[in-house]
Amino acid sequence: MQSEPGYIVHLLFVVITHTLLTTNLKRDCIQCSTGKFLVLLMIGGLAYLILTHSSQISSVNSLSKDIGTKKRDTVNVEGRFDRFWRKPPRLPPRLSPDEIRRNSSSIHGTKKLNAASDWISRQQSVKNAFIHAWSGYRNYAMGYDELMPLSQKGIDGLGGLGATIVDALDTAMIMGLDEVVSEAGSWIEKHLPERINQKDQVNLFETTIRILGGLLSAYHLSGGKQGKDLMHKGPKPIVYLENARNLADHLLVAFTSSPTAIPFSDVVLHDRSAHPSPNGLSSTSEVSTLQLEFNYLSSLTGDPKYRMESMKVLEHFKTLPKVEGLVPIYISPHSGGFSGENIRLGSRGDSYYEYLIKIWLQQLDSNLTYLHDMYEEAMKGVRHLLVRKSIPNGLVFVGELPYGFHGGFSPKMDHLVCFLPGTLALGATKGITKEKAMRANKLTFEDLENLKLAEDLAKTCFEMYSVTSTGLSPEIAYFNIEGSSEGGPDGGNKSSKYVHDIIIKYADRHNLLRPETVESLFILYRITEDPKYREWGWQIFKAFEQYTKVDSGGYSSLDDVTVLPPHRRDKMETFFLGETLKYLYLLFGDNTVLPLDEFVFNTEAHPFPIKRTTRE
């Protein structure tokens, strides 16, 4: 069917041409050359109009044939018209709106399928890395705390409780590695009870987050107390809970031996005694990063003593003076007060802030609003006192106050601080997606500010990797800022936009396979659904594979991330299997696995279920 304008042009062509060829006007016009030229010019113009319009070619051909048949002996109009005719290109058939939508859905569906397939493949790469790391540990260090992959031997640096086995167990469960779960679970069942009863000194904090946390998570993930039964191999779930309870009973002496609410830092397992560190102080982060584990144990056993002893610490912290919610990094178990004025979110300060919001999320049925209040006040203090921008390119970072509120600002940021983007995002949405929280009108102005800061800091943490020659982050970075006298070498990657923003001093260039950045990328991807966080995680994983993988098995820490090839340190930390690879695996996987509004991860990446209530 021709369009209406096309039909009019068609009709005019027929009438004018027919008139010219069938009346006396024809004879008058064609008797002179001028007339002939004008006739041809008019016919050509009309033909051009038809060619630039959407009229059907069959109609035009029919018209030309009709004219030629009637007056072929008078004037060869068709022959002249053919010189102007050019067959238009064939257009695709017009689709209905429904057909367009169906085709579009098919195209986008194929793209999504390909993207999903890519991430499944990348997730498998992380699983393969875990298997490689575990095989090195199993072959050369089974039963020791950590693997020395270059020396191909084990070392006990965490008290001799087989820390890598327990720390890695729930990662293997999440990955569905039956054989690893069976090996680790069998070792725990046969050897861990004796070691808990007979080993010597352990650190309260490290033993709680790695060993106690790992056992409790394994109990839940193996189906204990109506948990997720991810595995069918290994011992019965009760084995994990019994070992967790036995260990906690030994650790409680750190609380009960102290004259204040602040526990001692070290415990001697075989005689159940405790004592402070050599300088008499405890780290603020260490004494305030025990409560998720002890609370969950009380919930599982029905015995309140674990919760009561651990929560006394935070109740005491509530009463202590703070600087806009921020606290010094040392505290005395003898006086119960802070020691010194050094304020930072790096080592000895970090997980105090992390656990304020996580304990509140874990215990939603309890009257712990003071923890949420302390967290919000602290984050305001962070934004006001510790957040700066680098020059020349404006990376947002969190610095330190080594001499307190009245001292100078230091543009120093530990890699450990990269836990903060994830914690900020988690505190803002409580684990649901940003989109869902916005639709439900659940985000306050404070939440939105924290989310923005989270994304800015995650960018900085990633650039701490990409600015180096190896693509791996140093342990500590400094930032150039206005008016600062800081100076020093860069990360070695001259193509990085931020090579002049970040300073990496010689003593800080090592990499310990730490998890904090990929932890935040995992949480931010779950909450914002922005695929860039996955891509950043993949870049980091590839760098780990390229520079830290040891052919004989395991992965090694590095001495210097700014030079190629980097020198290796001959140490595989337990958290590489327990945290780093776990977070990367979850980052590349399905968002419905361990959802953040149903599970809270302890500071060693061991997931505990969140208690649900009708009040919530």
Image: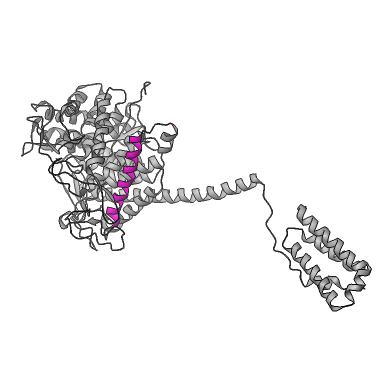
Q: Residue furthest bottom?
A: 33
Residue at screen point 31% across, 60% down: 496
Q: Residue furthest right?
A: 24
Q: In the image, 125: left or right of 325?
A: right
Q: Position of residue 309 (x, y in %)?
A: 17, 25
Quick check: can you spot residue 134?
yes
Frontmost residue, 85 versus 293: 85
- For residue 240, what is the image quadrant? top left
Q: Position of residue 202 (x, y in %)?
A: 13, 37
Q: In the image, 328: left or right of 178?
A: left
- For residue 308, what is the image quadrant? top left
Q: Which residues are magenta?
A: 440-467
Q: How many marks?
A: 0
205 relative to 132, above or below? above
Tell me the chief SS of the magenta region.
helix
- For residue 41, what is the image quadrant? bottom right
Quick check: can you spot residue 179?
no
Q: Position of residue 74 (x, y in %)?
A: 92, 73
Image quarter where the C terminus lies is top left
> Is residue 385 magenta-colored?
no
